[in-house]
Protein backbone atom coordinates (compact mmCIF):
# COMPACT_ATOMS: atom_id res chain seq x y z
CA UNK A 1 0.00 0.00 0.00
CA UNK A 2 1.13 3.59 -0.71
CA UNK A 3 -0.28 7.06 -0.06
CA UNK A 4 0.51 9.77 -2.61
CA UNK A 5 -1.33 12.73 -1.04
CA UNK A 6 -0.57 14.11 2.43
CA UNK A 7 -0.11 17.51 4.08
CA UNK A 8 2.07 18.58 7.02
CA UNK A 9 2.53 21.72 9.12
CA UNK A 10 4.51 23.11 6.17
CA UNK A 11 1.09 23.90 4.65
CA UNK A 12 -2.31 23.16 6.18
CA UNK A 13 -1.74 19.84 7.92
CA UNK A 14 -1.34 19.52 11.69
CA UNK A 15 1.42 16.87 11.75
CA UNK A 16 5.09 17.86 11.36
CA UNK A 17 6.75 16.50 8.17
CA UNK A 18 8.66 13.78 10.07
CA UNK A 19 5.39 12.42 11.44
CA UNK A 20 4.02 11.64 7.95
CA UNK A 21 6.38 8.67 7.25
CA UNK A 22 5.76 7.45 10.81
CA UNK A 23 2.01 7.35 10.17
CA UNK A 24 2.65 5.73 6.79
CA UNK A 25 4.83 3.01 8.34
CA UNK A 26 2.20 2.31 11.03
CA UNK A 27 -0.47 1.99 8.34
CA UNK A 28 1.68 -0.51 6.42
CA UNK A 29 2.64 1.78 3.52
CA UNK A 30 5.80 1.04 1.53
CA UNK A 31 5.85 4.59 0.11
CA UNK A 32 4.33 7.94 0.99
CA UNK A 33 4.34 11.30 -0.80
CA UNK A 34 4.36 14.57 1.11
CA UNK A 35 2.38 17.03 -1.03
CA UNK A 36 2.12 20.33 0.83
CA UNK A 37 0.38 23.22 -0.93
CA UNK A 38 2.97 25.29 -2.91
CA UNK A 39 5.89 24.19 -0.71
CA UNK A 40 8.74 21.67 -0.78
CA UNK A 41 10.15 22.74 2.59
CA UNK A 42 9.08 19.65 4.53
CA UNK A 43 10.64 17.11 2.19
CA UNK A 44 14.14 16.93 3.70
CA UNK A 45 12.80 16.29 7.20
CA UNK A 46 10.27 13.75 5.94
CA UNK A 47 12.85 11.95 3.80
CA UNK A 48 15.29 11.62 6.70
CA UNK A 49 12.64 10.02 8.93
CA UNK A 50 11.35 7.86 6.07
CA UNK A 51 14.81 6.44 5.50
CA UNK A 52 15.10 5.46 9.18
CA UNK A 53 11.77 3.66 8.90
CA UNK A 54 12.44 1.97 5.55
CA UNK A 55 9.60 3.84 3.84
CA UNK A 56 10.07 5.34 0.36
CA UNK A 57 9.44 9.12 0.51
CA UNK A 58 8.13 10.45 -2.81
CA UNK A 59 8.82 14.19 -3.03
CA UNK A 60 5.79 16.23 -4.05
CA UNK A 61 3.60 19.29 -3.71
CA UNK A 62 0.06 20.39 -4.63
CA UNK A 63 -0.58 23.49 -6.76
CA UNK A 64 -3.91 25.34 -7.16
CA UNK A 65 -4.75 26.10 -10.78
CA UNK A 66 -7.15 28.26 -12.74
CA UNK A 67 -9.73 26.21 -14.62
CA UNK A 68 -12.60 28.41 -15.74
CA UNK A 69 -15.15 28.78 -14.32
CA UNK A 70 -13.54 27.32 -11.20
CA UNK A 71 -10.21 26.01 -10.01
CA UNK A 72 -8.52 22.63 -9.75
CA UNK A 73 -5.56 21.14 -7.90
CA UNK A 74 -2.54 19.53 -9.54
CA UNK A 75 -0.21 17.21 -7.64
CA UNK A 76 3.43 17.22 -8.69
CA UNK A 77 5.78 14.32 -7.93
CA UNK A 78 9.57 13.79 -8.07
CA UNK A 79 10.52 17.46 -7.73
CA UNK A 80 13.07 18.10 -4.98
CA UNK A 81 13.76 21.37 -3.15
CA UNK A 82 16.41 23.51 -4.80
CA UNK A 83 16.80 25.32 -8.10
CA UNK A 84 14.52 24.76 -11.06
CA UNK A 85 11.58 26.14 -13.02
CA UNK A 86 8.85 24.75 -10.76
CA UNK A 87 10.81 25.60 -7.62
CA UNK A 88 11.16 29.22 -8.78
CA UNK A 89 7.44 29.49 -9.51
CA UNK A 90 6.60 28.05 -6.08
CA UNK A 91 8.63 30.87 -4.49
CA UNK A 92 6.46 33.39 -6.34
CA UNK A 93 3.27 31.62 -5.21
CA UNK A 94 4.52 31.69 -1.61
CA UNK A 95 5.17 35.43 -1.78
CA UNK A 96 1.69 35.94 -3.22
CA UNK A 97 0.17 33.92 -0.37
CA UNK A 98 1.84 36.17 2.23
CA UNK A 99 0.30 39.24 0.57
CA UNK A 100 -3.08 37.53 0.20
CA UNK A 101 -3.11 36.63 3.91
CA UNK A 102 -2.53 40.31 4.71
CA UNK A 103 -5.45 41.32 2.54
CA UNK A 104 -7.73 38.65 3.97
CA UNK A 105 -6.89 39.69 7.54
CA UNK A 106 -7.81 43.28 6.58
CA UNK A 107 -11.10 42.10 5.10
CA UNK A 108 -11.94 40.03 8.16
CA UNK A 109 -11.20 43.06 10.34
CA UNK A 110 -13.52 45.17 8.18
CA UNK A 111 -16.22 42.52 8.74
CA UNK A 112 -15.68 42.93 12.49
CA UNK A 113 -13.56 39.80 12.95
CA UNK A 114 -10.20 40.49 14.53
CA UNK A 115 -7.69 37.89 13.33
CA UNK A 116 -4.08 39.06 13.42
CA UNK A 117 -1.14 37.98 11.26
CA UNK A 118 0.61 36.92 14.47
CA UNK A 119 -2.27 34.61 15.40
CA UNK A 120 -2.23 33.24 11.88
CA UNK A 121 1.50 32.49 12.00
CA UNK A 122 1.09 30.85 15.41
CA UNK A 123 -1.80 28.69 14.16
CA UNK A 124 0.20 27.63 11.09
CA UNK A 125 3.36 27.00 13.11
CA UNK A 126 5.34 29.41 10.91
CA UNK A 127 4.97 29.89 7.17
CA UNK A 128 2.39 28.44 4.81
CA UNK A 129 -0.70 29.87 6.53
CA UNK A 130 -3.96 29.87 4.63
CA UNK A 131 -7.71 29.75 4.95
CA UNK A 132 -7.91 26.54 7.03
CA UNK A 133 -5.82 28.27 9.71
CA UNK A 134 -8.08 31.34 9.62
CA UNK A 135 -11.08 29.03 9.94
CA UNK A 136 -9.52 27.32 12.94
CA UNK A 137 -8.91 30.66 14.68
CA UNK A 138 -12.52 31.74 14.05
CA UNK A 139 -13.77 28.46 15.54
CA UNK A 140 -11.53 28.84 18.59
CA UNK A 141 -12.79 32.41 19.14
CA UNK A 142 -16.36 31.15 19.04
CA UNK A 143 -17.22 33.30 16.00
CA UNK A 144 -18.41 30.19 14.12
CA UNK A 145 -19.28 26.68 15.20
CA UNK A 146 -17.12 24.79 12.69
CA UNK A 147 -14.43 25.10 10.03
CA UNK A 148 -17.09 24.45 7.40
CA UNK A 149 -19.23 27.31 8.76
CA UNK A 150 -16.18 29.60 8.64
CA UNK A 151 -15.77 28.81 4.93
CA UNK A 152 -19.49 29.06 4.20
CA UNK A 153 -19.91 32.47 5.87
CA UNK A 154 -16.53 34.23 5.67
CA UNK A 155 -13.74 32.45 3.79
CA UNK A 156 -15.21 30.71 0.76
CA UNK A 157 -15.12 32.18 -2.75
CA UNK A 158 -17.31 35.29 -2.90
CA UNK A 159 -17.63 35.57 0.91
CA UNK A 160 -16.60 38.81 2.71
CA UNK A 161 -13.14 37.61 3.84
CA UNK A 162 -12.16 36.03 0.54
CA UNK A 163 -9.31 37.23 -1.63
CA UNK A 164 -8.31 35.14 -4.65
CA UNK A 165 -4.74 33.89 -4.90
CA UNK A 166 -2.35 33.64 -7.83
CA UNK A 167 -3.04 30.56 -9.90
CA UNK A 168 -1.30 28.96 -12.86
CA UNK A 169 -2.88 26.96 -15.65
CA UNK A 170 -2.63 23.15 -15.41
CA UNK A 171 -0.60 23.23 -18.63
CA UNK A 172 1.93 25.61 -17.09
CA UNK A 173 2.24 23.45 -13.96
CA UNK A 174 2.73 20.33 -16.11
CA UNK A 175 5.42 22.11 -18.15
CA UNK A 176 7.20 23.45 -15.06
CA UNK A 177 6.99 20.01 -13.41
CA UNK A 178 8.55 18.34 -16.45
CA UNK A 179 11.19 21.07 -16.61
CA UNK A 180 12.08 20.18 -13.03
CA UNK A 181 12.18 16.43 -13.72
CA UNK A 182 8.75 15.65 -12.34
CA UNK A 183 5.24 14.64 -13.37
CA UNK A 184 1.83 16.28 -12.82
CA UNK A 185 -1.40 14.56 -11.75
CA UNK A 186 -4.98 15.84 -11.46
CA UNK A 187 -5.96 15.78 -7.77
CA UNK A 188 -9.44 14.80 -6.49
CA UNK A 189 -11.08 15.05 -9.97
CA UNK A 190 -14.64 15.21 -8.59
CA UNK A 191 -13.82 18.69 -7.22
CA UNK A 192 -14.38 19.87 -10.80
CA UNK A 193 -18.06 19.10 -10.13
CA UNK A 194 -18.70 17.86 -13.65
CA UNK A 195 -21.01 15.18 -14.99
CA UNK A 196 -19.56 12.10 -16.72
CA UNK A 197 -19.39 13.55 -20.22
CA UNK A 198 -17.97 16.93 -19.20
CA UNK A 199 -15.47 15.25 -16.89
CA UNK A 200 -14.25 12.98 -19.69
CA UNK A 201 -13.68 15.96 -21.98
CA UNK A 202 -11.93 17.93 -19.22
CA UNK A 203 -9.65 14.94 -18.56
CA UNK A 204 -8.91 14.63 -22.28
CA UNK A 205 -7.93 18.30 -22.33
CA UNK A 206 -5.74 17.93 -19.25
CA UNK A 207 -4.03 14.85 -20.68
CA UNK A 208 -3.35 16.93 -23.81
CA UNK A 209 -1.95 19.67 -21.58
CA UNK A 210 0.68 17.26 -20.25
CA UNK A 211 -0.80 15.67 -17.13
CA UNK A 212 0.36 12.11 -16.50
CA UNK A 213 -2.09 10.79 -13.95
CA UNK A 214 -5.52 11.01 -12.33
CA UNK A 215 -6.13 10.69 -8.59
CA UNK A 216 -8.96 8.18 -8.88
CA UNK A 217 -8.29 6.48 -5.53
CA UNK A 218 -9.03 9.45 -3.29
CA UNK A 219 -9.66 9.17 0.44
CA UNK A 220 -13.13 10.68 0.41
CA UNK A 221 -14.48 8.89 -2.69
CA UNK A 222 -16.73 5.85 -2.65
CA UNK A 223 -15.63 2.55 -4.24
CA UNK A 224 -18.01 3.28 -7.13
CA UNK A 225 -16.58 6.77 -7.72
CA UNK A 226 -13.03 5.39 -7.65
CA UNK A 227 -13.92 2.73 -10.21
CA UNK A 228 -15.51 5.27 -12.57
CA UNK A 229 -12.49 7.57 -12.30
CA UNK A 230 -10.01 4.71 -12.81
CA UNK A 231 -11.90 3.88 -16.00
CA UNK A 232 -11.66 7.52 -17.17
CA UNK A 233 -7.91 7.45 -16.44
CA UNK A 234 -7.37 4.24 -18.42
CA UNK A 235 -9.27 5.60 -21.39
CA UNK A 236 -6.96 8.64 -21.51
CA UNK A 237 -3.74 6.70 -20.90
CA UNK A 238 -3.28 8.32 -17.48
CA UNK A 239 -1.76 6.59 -14.47
CA UNK A 240 -4.35 5.76 -11.79
CA UNK A 241 -2.96 7.34 -8.63
CA UNK A 242 -4.33 7.78 -5.15
CA UNK A 243 -3.93 9.13 -1.68
CA UNK A 244 -5.72 10.06 1.50
CA UNK A 245 -5.29 13.89 1.45
CA UNK A 246 -4.40 13.55 5.13
CA UNK A 247 -4.38 16.97 6.91
CA UNK A 248 -4.32 15.73 10.54
CA UNK A 249 -6.80 17.60 12.72
CA UNK A 250 -7.80 19.90 9.83
CA UNK A 251 -9.53 16.95 8.10
CA UNK A 252 -10.00 14.53 11.00
CA UNK A 253 -11.80 11.89 8.92
CA UNK A 254 -8.69 11.15 6.82
CA UNK A 255 -5.78 8.95 7.93
CA UNK A 256 -2.46 8.33 6.15
CA UNK A 257 -2.65 5.16 4.05
CA UNK A 258 -6.24 4.14 4.63
CA UNK A 259 -8.13 7.43 4.22
CA UNK A 260 -11.51 6.78 5.86
CA UNK A 261 -10.51 3.16 6.43
CA UNK A 262 -11.15 1.66 3.01
CA UNK A 263 -8.37 3.14 0.88
CA UNK A 264 -5.59 0.92 -0.48
CA UNK A 265 -3.44 2.34 -3.28
CA UNK A 266 -1.26 -0.36 -4.88
CA UNK A 267 2.55 -0.33 -4.47
CA UNK A 268 2.97 -0.43 -8.27
CA UNK A 269 1.61 3.13 -8.56
CA UNK A 270 4.94 4.78 -7.75
CA UNK A 271 6.83 2.91 -10.49
CA UNK A 272 4.02 3.57 -12.99
CA UNK A 273 4.31 7.29 -12.26
CA UNK A 274 8.11 7.24 -12.33
CA UNK A 275 7.94 5.79 -15.86
CA UNK A 276 6.26 9.01 -16.99
CA UNK A 277 9.16 11.17 -15.83
CA UNK A 278 10.84 13.16 -18.62
P1 LIG B 1 -6.02 28.30 0.65
O1 LIG B 1 -4.91 27.64 -0.10
O2 LIG B 1 -5.52 29.18 1.74
O3 LIG B 1 -6.99 28.99 -0.28
O4 LIG B 1 -6.84 27.14 1.37
C1 LIG B 1 -7.26 26.04 0.59
C2 LIG B 1 -7.64 24.89 1.52
O5 LIG B 1 -8.82 25.27 2.24
C3 LIG B 1 -8.01 23.64 0.76
O6 LIG B 1 -6.90 22.79 0.62
C4 LIG B 1 -9.04 22.99 1.64
O7 LIG B 1 -8.36 22.18 2.60
C5 LIG B 1 -9.68 24.15 2.37
N1 LIG B 1 -10.97 24.54 1.78
C6 LIG B 1 -11.19 25.25 0.64
N2 LIG B 1 -12.50 25.47 0.42
C7 LIG B 1 -13.16 24.91 1.47
C8 LIG B 1 -14.54 24.79 1.84
N3 LIG B 1 -15.52 25.33 1.10
N4 LIG B 1 -14.82 24.14 2.99
C9 LIG B 1 -13.84 23.60 3.75
N5 LIG B 1 -12.52 23.67 3.45
C10 LIG B 1 -12.18 24.30 2.33
FE1 LIG C 1 -5.32 21.66 2.12
FE1 LIG D 1 -6.40 19.59 -2.93
ZN1 LIG E 1 -4.35 18.11 -0.70
Image (cartoon, grey):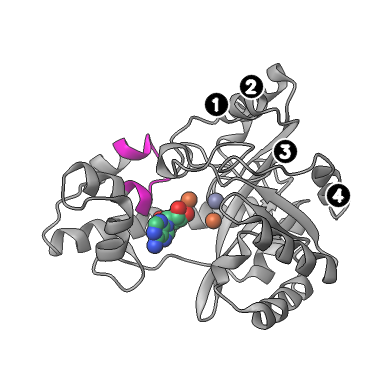
Circle 4 sits on which residue?
272
Label 2 vs 3, first from the N-terminus: 3
Span colored in magenta:
122-133
x, y percentage for residue 122? 30, 36
Mark 4 residue element: helix
Q: Are marks 1 and 3 in contact (CB under 8 Å)?
A: no
Circle 1 sits on which residue?
19
Q: Is residue 84 above or below residue 52?
A: below
| Residue at 75% in and 65% down | 211
Q: Is residue 111 left or right of residue 90?
A: left
| Residue at 66% in and 44% down | 263
Q: Nearer the viewer, residue 137 or 192?
A: 192
Residue 212, magenta (yes or no): no
Mark number, residue 49 = 2
Q: Residues within 10 Å of mark 3 (few under 14, many from 20)?
A: many
Q: Residues within 10 Å of mark 1 (few under 14, many from 20)?
A: some
x, y percentage for residue 79? 71, 46
x, y percentage for residue 5? 62, 46
> Which quarter of the picture shows residue 40?
top right
Circle 3 sits on which residue?
2
Amino acid sequence: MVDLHTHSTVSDGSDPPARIPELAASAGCTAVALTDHDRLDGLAEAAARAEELGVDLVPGCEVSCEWAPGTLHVLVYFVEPGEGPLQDELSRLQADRVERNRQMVDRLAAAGLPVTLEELAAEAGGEGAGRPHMASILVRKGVVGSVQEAFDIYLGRGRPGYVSKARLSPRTVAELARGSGGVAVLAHPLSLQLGHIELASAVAELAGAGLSGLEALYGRYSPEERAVLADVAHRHDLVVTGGSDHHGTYKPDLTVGTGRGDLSVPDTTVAALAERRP
